[in-house]
Image (cartoon, rainbow, N blue to C red):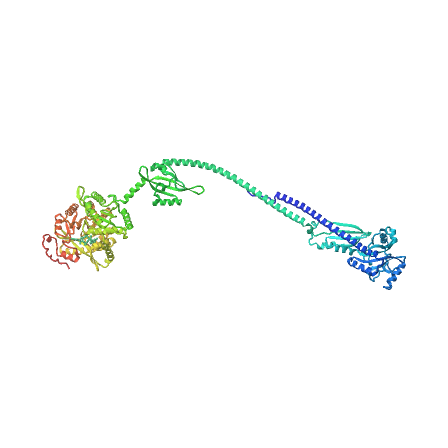
Amino acid sequence: MARRFTPVSLAAAVTLAAGLCVTGALFLAVSALEYGKQSEGFQQRANLRVAAIRRGLDDAVEVLTVTNQLFRTMPEVTQEQFSDFARPLLQRHPFMLSFTHQRWMTHDERLAFEARVAAGRPGFTVTEIRAGQIVPAAKRERYLVAELFAPLTTQPGTLGLDVWPLAATPATAERMLHTGKPAATPLVSVMQPVQRDSFVLLMPLYRPGMPTETPRQRRAAWSGETAALVRAPHLVHTILQYGGLLDDPHLLLRVYAGDDAELVYTTGAETDADDRRWFTPPPWLDIHRPEHVAKRFDLLGQTWHVRVDALPRPFLADHAGSLIALVGGLLFSLLAAALVHTLEQRSRRVQWLVDERTADLRRSNAQLNDDVAARKRTERALQESEHRFRRLLALSSDWYWEQDANFCFTQITDGFFDKARVQRKDYIGRTRWQIAPGYLESKVGRDHYALLQARQPFANLEHEITGNDGITRWFQSTGEPVYDAQGEFRGYRGTGSDITERKMTEQRIRHIAHHDALTGLPNRILLQDRLAQAVAWANRGGRRMWVLLIDLDRFKFVNDTLGHKAGDQLLRTIAGRLRAAVRESDTVARLSGDEFVVILCEHADSALVDEVVERIMGALAQPMTLEGKEFCVTCSIGVAAYAADGTPADHLIEHADIAMYAAKKLGRNRWQFYHDAMNEQTEERLRIEGALRSALERNEFVLHYQPQVDLASGRIVGMEALLRWQHPELGMVPPQRFIGLAEETGLIVPIGAWVLRTACAQAKAWNDMWELCGLAPLRVAVNLSARQFAQPDLVASIAAVLDDTGLPAACLDLELTESLFVDDVAQALDLLHQLKALGVALSIDDFGTGYSSFSSLRTFPIDVLKIDRSFVADIASDADEAAIVVSIIALAHNLKLRVIAEGVESTAQLEFLRAHGCDEMQGYHFSRPVPAEEFGKMIRSGRSLAAELRREPAPEPEPIPLPA
Ligand SMILES: Nc1nc2c(ncn2[C@@H]2O[C@@H]3COP(=O)(O)O[C@H]4[C@@H](O)[C@H](n5cnc6c(=O)[nH]c(N)nc65)O[C@@H]4COP(=O)(O)O[C@H]3[C@H]2O)c(=O)[nH]1
């Protein structure tokens, strides 16, 4: 809304008008007062002056009276006496021009007088004024002659002047004698043509002794008179001057004398007054009121008029009050009007604001009504929603909870108490940490408390509660902070649900993930965890702990011969025995197939560990029944001790593994402590690895050949190519020391390719040579490592070697280990078929030490089974071993496979093998692996086993002539 205010409000205008009226009235009233005061002052001043003049005239008469008194008291007064008497009077009253003693004398008396005076002033005569000239007086009967004159001068018209002829004298003398009082002449001029401004005061002198009561008597007694010539302007001026009454510039004083009212004195000219006015008010303000005082009085028969006129005065002198009233009133009026205007404007503005606010309020009210209606609708919707929510909560498995600002539960819906089997009173009004003491000491509790303090929402807070039925259940809560409309924190609210079932499932899954499914023991993952805990435990207390790596001896044989089921049963039994042999606090884990790890803590010293290890070995060695047969299982154990020296946990198992292999090397059913020397072997491996990388380039590899002899004929039917490394510093390095390393590093691939190519070329050369001698071609067996087997171009590269060297495929026997088939049987089978398609023979090397079973062999296209020399070693002394070897031979033959026994070192072994139908043998008994040259000689010499079988010294073979 636009604001509209008038420029000047009515109230302001009225106030201004009223102010102006009051100002005007005040101005007039003050002016009236000022005028009254001015008039009064004027009257006073005027009357003061009139009175002064009158008093001055009376004084002049008084002076004359004094002079007259002189003549009354002294009958004869000389000129000198008169002059002396009059001098001070003249000096004191300068307006008195002269004093005269005039005598009424006869002509004789004139003459006498003239004669008396002429004595001092020759030629003196009585004079008179005729036609304005002083001339000797004409002869008359009577003369009124100035007999004495003061001040006495020689000027004519002074001493001796007959004043009787003067026009005013007779009448004045008549009046004086008539009244018997002094009289004044009308104005006269002392000297022509000077204006008439003087008058003469006359006081009669009578002859002594004569009566003077009546005019007649006085005329008769009259002898003369005392006269004083008074200059009227001087008289008035002197009177006013002596009275200090001349300095009023605002008065115009005029004095008139005589019946004709001739002006004799003026003071305070109007023009002078105008000149003195420094401020000339504007005509409308200069309201000068003409005022005068006119007094008339009689002086010795002459009428005097005194008129005093008020002259205009400086405006401010008399009208400051009214002017101040006027200006002040105007200012006040304007200010009052301005104030009223401002108040009016403010009032209007306030009114406008009130109107505005009222309009706003109306709008707000309308809005509020709408809001209230909307809020009611919302509340209804909310109630419905809450009802639905409560119904849903009642129907759902979840519940709702609320906490106050102190995190105490204020509400929990019933579902929780039903699920948790706890009582409401134990929860309402209490915090989580009050309900569960120790909650804040847990990490979860501390984290949760920190979240609450930070007013952060939280989700899926898990906690377990043991109900009144003693069962522990799991729950989860999700909550958010609650704030009121002012943003004040009010607490938390959220939902909860029962997650016991999920937790149990998770526990089961976690158990499965961390435990071996077959034995129930911790698996490799959990083992790592336990190991880390044990290391931390040892580090904390500076204590010792031990890690045992247990490897079952010949488990694979059991697995192969009796099947997986029996193998599984064996492993379960072993696991149970291991568990029983150690303390509850010790950890027993299954590392891989037949490898177990035991972590021993809290055993004071190694002597006790010895006991534990012996106990374990004893427990495992106990006979067990598998598939109805009784079996004894031995194991090899490596022990690594941890002395809180910071050895990483991983290395402990590694060390135990090294120790276990050391034990195995020493023969089965043994145990070994790990010691640093074992680790030196590892270091040596590193040294060897470095040298191995350049060995091929430096031509440091050679092949030795070990004959394979047919047990039936005793003849050499083949040879196994065995790699030798002729190191310039290490000397002849056996394959056990570097083959594994080459395998690990991948160097076995190029090395193996070199072996294959060299062996094939050598075999081809020999066969070509021996063919010329009429000898049957020999097979050459070449070991194929897992890495080579995994090469995608394996088949093609072998074909290329055969092609390049020209060796018939049938003369090549590829020796494979069982481990090649374990990972991906289908792929391995496919590869074997491809190799078989080349025409080469396939052997399973070291049979019995791996995972392969007879059932799997059945599916593989292999030709030869090589019994590992570890089985052969004990066949003569160990019935079990012998039984195993016999079983292998029988089963192989059953599969139409040739059987080669490795590591035959003695005749007994030879005999045993031959007796049980083993096809071929290979071993030191016949020959160690020998260099190619030596092997060639062996062939050429025609060496065979037949002679040895007959226990005859082998005849020195005839040298076979080599073709040129
Ligand atoms: N104690 C004893 N040992 C006997 C007797 N008769 C033969 N031997 C040894 O038994 C091993 C037979 O080779 P293998 O089982 O294939 O076992 C081989 C084979 O697995 C591997 N190897 C050797 N040369 C190569 C090769 O060129 N390529 C691959 N991949 N592996 C090879 O190294 C292993 C060891 O080879 P060698 O030290 O040459 O050891 C040879 C051989 O000298 C005996 O009567 N008594």
839 sits left or right of 480 in the view: left
Q: Residue at x 67, y 49 (%)?
A: 321
Is residue 189 placed above or below 521 in the rendered structure? Answer: below
Is residue 841 placed above or below 355 in the rendered structure? Answer: below
- Residue 166 visible (yes or no): yes
User: Which picture quadrant has residue 503?
Assistant: top left
Q: Nearer the viewer, residue 882 or 813?
A: 882
- Residue 843 visible (yes or no): no
Quarter of the image with the N terminus is: top right
Q: Nearer the viewer, residue 431 or 93?
A: 93
Quarter of the image with the C terminus is: bottom left
Q: Number of numbered discs present? A: 0
Q: Residue at x 53, y 40 (%)?
A: 359
Give how far across and how far down residue 935 sits, in percent.
15, 56
576 sits left or right of 45 in the view: left
Q: Nearer the viewer, residue 123 or 802?
A: 123
Give how far across and how far down residue 124 sits, in percent.
86, 62
Give how far across and how far down residue 847 sits, in percent.
19, 49
Give how far across and how far down residue 806 sits, in percent.
19, 54
